[in-house]
Amino acid sequence: MYQIMINDTTLRDGEQAAGVAFNLEEKVAIAQFLDTIGVHELEVGIPAMGEEEIRAIVAIRNLDLNAKLLGWNRAVLSDIKASIACGLERVHIAIPVSGVQIAAKFHGQWRVSLQKLKDCISFALDQGLWVSVGGEDSSRADENFLQDVAMLSQEWGASRFRFCDTVGVLDPFRTHLKVKHLVSTLSIPIEIHTHNDFGLATANALAGIKAGAVSVNTTVNGLGERAGNAALEEVIMALKCIYGVDLGIQTQHLLKLSQLVAKASGANVQPWKAIVGENTFAHESGIHAHGVLQNPVTYEPYAPEDVGWERRLVIGKHSGRHSLSNLLEQHGIFLDSQEIQAILDVVRQQSILKKRSLTTEELLNLVSEKRYSHAT
Ligand SMILES: CC(=O)SCCNC(=O)CCNC(=O)[C@H](O)C(C)(C)COP(=O)(O)OP(=O)(O)OC[C@H]1O[C@@H](n2cnc3c(N)ncnc32)[C@H](O)[C@@H]1OP(=O)(O)O
Ligand SMILES: O=C(O)CCC(=O)C(=O)O
């Protein structure tokens, strides 16, 4: 596969998640972290939002990061001027391309909106900026119209075109078809931007990449509009482990990054969230724990350290003898199989009553209450 670039939009589309508002320090810390681990490009925000946003973007720009920085703009000249005021050298200009969006936002006047796009690209180029164009709602657009807008963007001087599945309605097969078609007709690179309304954002992002997109938009934890975007950590790890494509990103820090963004966004990730959820390397079920004790590869697709986790064996309703003995032995407690089974029976009852697994302390108390501690 060709060189894939991540253009992370946690600081733009991620922050658009309803109820999320990063302050300047949080935006700076997230940008710095993303840069440190080697993310190639950051969509840092929307300068047109005004003073506060501009201050944060300027602070990020002043960090002199390795990552390229991109400002998001509408096809509105004052937006581009705001990006310039931030000192950004790269601007992304978005334009709706579906019938439904053009009707609702531009009263159907697609010629007017294309003229605005042309004027904005031309103005940005005159100012020496690098320009990317986004086809908002590309997935629902008429294919010929989308093609025309992309070709015109290229002709007018854009250096990249973003294919957006704005409301997350594609599946990987249709994503592949649509992106492949664009890739085969344009000479500028394609970026894929996907949403998770049907839980397919990461799969669709990968399908876009397979079809030839060389840049992919992600957000940490999949944060973003409605059901969110393709998650940075999922795209990176899927590319690495499923396709064997190493983006050169320091994946061992992905968990810490996730925690930083969860805190700043006030949105915790669910325990079963791929890569960064707290259950990712937690094994309770007896059959799984037994397998993992023999060889972790039985139930782990990659090593926990690869993303910053440690493996956890959890004792609860579904545990079996092997993991219980293993845990007790780590505390110097050696029981025979009858004793282990008796403890397991109580563990099951207590887990149901407490509606959770048992802590190590609870388990050790249980053993001593049951007077098995003599077996040490
Ligand atoms: C799919 C996406 O994620 S797109 C990104 C969406 N992100 C955001 O909206 C977050 C930040 N947005 C904001 O702070 C504000 O919406 C602003 C500053 C951009 C604009 O604010 P306001 O001037 O108050 O306008 P408001 O948000 O109510 O309406 C949007 C306006 O932008 C226009 N617009 C929307 N998209 C585009 C576009 N791509 N190009 C040009 N104009 C556009 C709309 O037609 C509407 O114009 P109108 O005021 O002439 O009717
Ligand atoms: O950049 C664009 O064109 C729009 C990006 C976006 O957030 C979307 O379409 O969901």
Image (cartoon, helix red, strand yellow):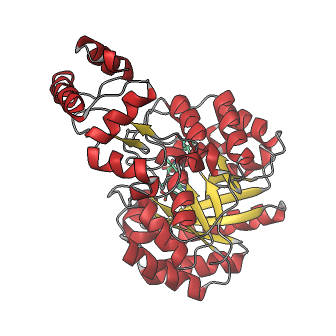
Residue 30 at x, y percent in the picture: 65, 38
Q: Residue at x 59, y 50 (%)?
A: 306
Identify the image quadrant of the N terminus.
bottom right
Residue 186 at x, y percent in the picture: 62, 84
Residue 138 at x, y percent in the picture: 46, 70
Using residue 180 as the reference point, say whether residue 321 is left or right of it: left
Q: Nearer the viewer, residue 100 or 284?
A: 284
Within the image, what quadrant is residue 60 found in?
top right
Residue 182 at x, y percent in the picture: 54, 82
Residue at the far bottom in the pictured view: 185
195 shown above or below 342:
below
Is there any visible trace of residue 123 in the rendered image? no
Is there any visible trace of residue 291 in the rendered image? yes
Q: Residue at x 70, y 76 (%)?
A: 156
Q: Residue at x 46, y 41 (%)?
A: 17
Q: Nearer the viewer, residue 209 or 239?
A: 239
Using residue 291 as the reference point, say whether residue 116 is left or right of it: right
302 shown above or below 364:
below
Q: Nearer the viewer, residue 218 or 256?
A: 256
Q: Residue at x 15, y 26 (%)?
A: 349
